[in-house]
Structure formats: structure tokens, C-alpha cells
Amino acid sequence: MKQIDCFLPYIDESQYKKLQKAFEEVSAFVTLHALKDSLYQTTTIQQIAEETKGEYCLLITKSTPLKLHYLALERLQQIAEDSKAGLVYADHYQLKDDKCVNAPVIDYQQGSLRDDFDFGSVLLFNSKALKESCQRMKNSYQHAALYDLRLKLSQRYDLVHANEYLYTEIEEDNRKSGEKQFDYVDPRNQDRQKEMESACTEHLKEIGGYLKPSFKTVDFVHDAFEFEASVIIPVKNRETTIEAAIRSVLAQKANFKYNILVIDNHSTDGTTEKIDQYKDDERVVHIVPERNDLGIGGCWNLGIHHPKCGKFAAQLDSDDLYQDENTLQTIVNAFYEQQCAMVIGTYRMTDFDLNTLSPGVIDHREWTPENGRNNALRINGLGAPRAFYTPIARQIGFPNTSYGEDYAMGLNISRHYQIGRIYDVLYLCRRWGGNSDAALSIERVNANNLYKDRIRTWELQARINLHKE
């Protein structure tokens, strides 16, 4: 075995001794270092690079007790040797409330630019790769150093996922997946987010994926639209919520003609009958697809290509509501005022009775007109409600999926056009017992994250190729 320098978080002697125990059986080839400063500070990363003398560097990112499985470090090192990886990370178990649960992680891709990408808490670096990458770190960060390091590392080395269960960790964060999803918009994290954006933007510049704030103009002169705006509602089996969604659109006051396209994706629970109650209102267009293979994105494609679709297509999920009667007018005004191909508003998380739920208002104030489209590759979502200039949305098209389809469209639009923002609450996102994303399994979260990283990868490749043309 080659020598490993292992860095353990040190909070106090009691905590450190518990963490130390995991390494008693590997002391012949592992040298332990107590890490008293934050792993997220650049000075700490530089200290680690300087103190590392062995061929490998092992970073433990959690301060809680850890159990290494039989020959785990030997296996990590073997994979590192065979693959010549800059970093190897692995699947593991988590001990939660005396129950051991699987905690698989996902493969790293070129587009894995989220700063909260889950590597687990055991990271084995090739020391030469670590030191070389550390030398290329230009900025001094308080929060983004580990993120900066991994981006620098990824520019020249592979980050390899060992999909084997090699250790057990204590889970410190027991929040549901739906709660963790919004960490990046928490106002308390703004300083951290600015640093993450800086590190990501620098990385994009270095790999040729950065886009300058120069945008195509949008020509809104189209005579072919009977309606100025359409609200598109894809729905399947939402008998208890669809009527309220429709009513919230019909209550809109606007100085233009608008309608609702309800894409009823073969509901079986009474949803269809609820929609049919509005058949005498010409503003409500009830569309039942002839196909049976449509996800939410496919329903959106059907909607935007429908002859009754308006010049602007606005989102309303079948669970949700518009904040008040002015939402649609505000959205359409923003297209003209901001000269953009897509508009994204602000929403409030509520329960079924419209009581505010944590984290409350999601306004995405991290967005800037100058750098928003670059930072969009790092954050996990663009916000809601979303609305699109229909000719451009038709030209691009949504992926026929039921997750990330809107994010893919937004990234593609932002490659060429400005995205407009509205920071007033326009939309109520209702979480309830039957809601599809309030608490997801680790397998579902991983599948979602893997797909979004794939979307980012394709978009990043498109942007890099744009510079080569």
C-alpha cells in the first residue's frame, strides 16, 4: 500500500477521538492530521496540499464518527491506481436513527457543476493532482475552496465514482429532499453563493464555456397569434386541485386576449370530468393527447404547437395557483419591458390551505442580467412561474421528460437570449400529501440529479462548441 495522508475535521478532543477510531486498523499506511480550520477556506486547502507527503491524500468532510468497511482504503487506492484518477469517491451507508440506509452517489460528468454535488464524506485524492490543482487556485475563498479545488481538478483529471459500498457515516442532515433542494436560495447563504458563482464562472472561462453578456434581440412582431398569452397546464390525476388552478387563471384581469390549454394526460380519477365543467368557456381548451408516451415536457410541446396557443406561453402546474388576478398581465408586460425570450417570476411555498411553508419565498435573487446564464449551470433550478415567447419555445422544444424539462428549455434559451426576472410573488406552489417532489427516495433524487447534470453537460458542450464556430 502506498502512503496516505488523512485529514480529519477537529472540533474538540472527544469528537476527534471518535473519528480517529475508524483508522486504527490502517495506521501502517495512513498518517492522520487534525484539521482545525474550515475545509472550505482556501488557506486550509493550501495547508493540506503542503502537509501531504504521501502518494495519496484522504479528506474526510464530516466531523461525525465513521466506519470504514473491510479493506475499503485498499480498494479506493486500487481504483485510483488503475484509473489514474485525480479523485475517487464511493457509495456508502448512513446510520440514521439506528437504521442503516443505502446512500449511493452518482457519476461525475463535465456538467456536474452544482456546488452541492454529493461525493459522500470520504474523498481520496491523488497527491500530485491535488497539489497541481491547488497551484491553479487564483482566489482566496472563505466558503468555496473545496468547490474551487474540485473544478480545477476536473479540468485535467478524472473524478471517479466507485459504485461499491465502502464505508458507513452518521447522517447529520435529516431534512427531506424537498427541503434541501432550496439551500442555494436561502438568503442566509448569500455570501457563500457569491463565492460559488465566482468559482464556477472562473472555471467556465478556463474551459471555454463562459458566455459574455451579449444577447440576441427578440422580435415580438407576429400576427399569427389569435391570443396574446396562453396558460399551459399539463395534468394527470389531480382531481382535487385542477379546478382551483383553472379558476385562478380565469380570474386574471388583462388588457389582452388569453386562454388556458389544459393538457389532460389520460387522467383516470375524475380530473377529466372536472375540466369538462368548463367546456362552455371558450377560454378553456381541453386537450387529451392521442399519444400515450408523453411526459410533462411532451405535454408542453403539444401545448405550444397547438393552433390556439398564444404568443406567450405561461406555466401553471396543476397543483398550484396564481398569486392574484394580475399575474398574467405582469408576466406579459415583463416580456416587452425587458425584451427577453423567457420570463421567470417569484413564488411562495404553501401548504394546501395556503399557509406559508419553509423556505417561504423563492425569488432567485442570485440571478444577474450579466452573469445569470453562466450561473444557471451551477444552480439547481431557475424558478417559477416560467413563461416563454412561443416562437422560440417551438424552435427549441422541451425534452419529453417529467423532470428537468423546464430547466433544459431555460438553459437553451439563455444560451442566446436574455431571461427576464420578476421579483414580486406571482405564484403559490402548494405542497401536499400527494405532491410528487416533497420527499423523494435517494434513488429518485440521484436519478433526477444525474439527469440534470446530463442536461448541463449537453448545454456546456453546446456553449464550448459555440466558441469554436
Image (spheres, rainbow, N blue to C red):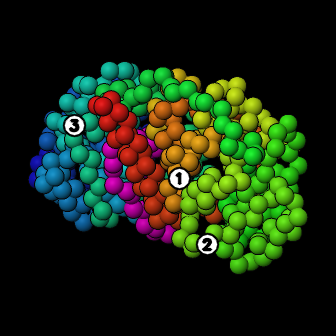
Q: Amino acid at mark 3?
A: Arg
Q: Which residues are magenta?
A: 95-118
Q: Which residue is mark 3?
A: 156
Image point 86% across, 45% down: which residue? 252
Residue at the limit of the structure toward the front, as seen here: 223
Q: Earlier in the sequence, mark 3 or mark 2?
A: 3
- In percent of width and height, residue 384 lies at 66, 44
Q: Amino acid at mark 1?
A: Phe
Q: Earlier in the sequence, mark 1 or mark 3?
A: 3
- In percent of width and height, residue 93 lies at 40, 64
Q: Element at badge 1?
A: loop
Q: Main secondary structure of the magenta part?
A: loop
Q: Which residue is mark 2?
A: 290
Q: Which residue is mark 1?
A: 398
Viewer-nearest of discs 3 and 2: 2
* Left or right of residue 181: residue 344: right
Image point 22% across, 56% down: which residue? 76
Q: Amino acid at mark 2?
A: Glu
Is residue 22 something that shows in the picture?
Answer: no
* Left or right of residue 356: residue 129: left
- In percent of width and height, residue 103 lies at 42, 62
Is residue 62 found inside the magenta-colored segment of the image?
no
- How many neighbours does mark 3 have within 10 angstroms: few (below 14), some (14-19), or many (20 or more)? few
Image point 15% across, 48% down: which residue? 84
Viewer-nearest of discs 1 and 2: 2
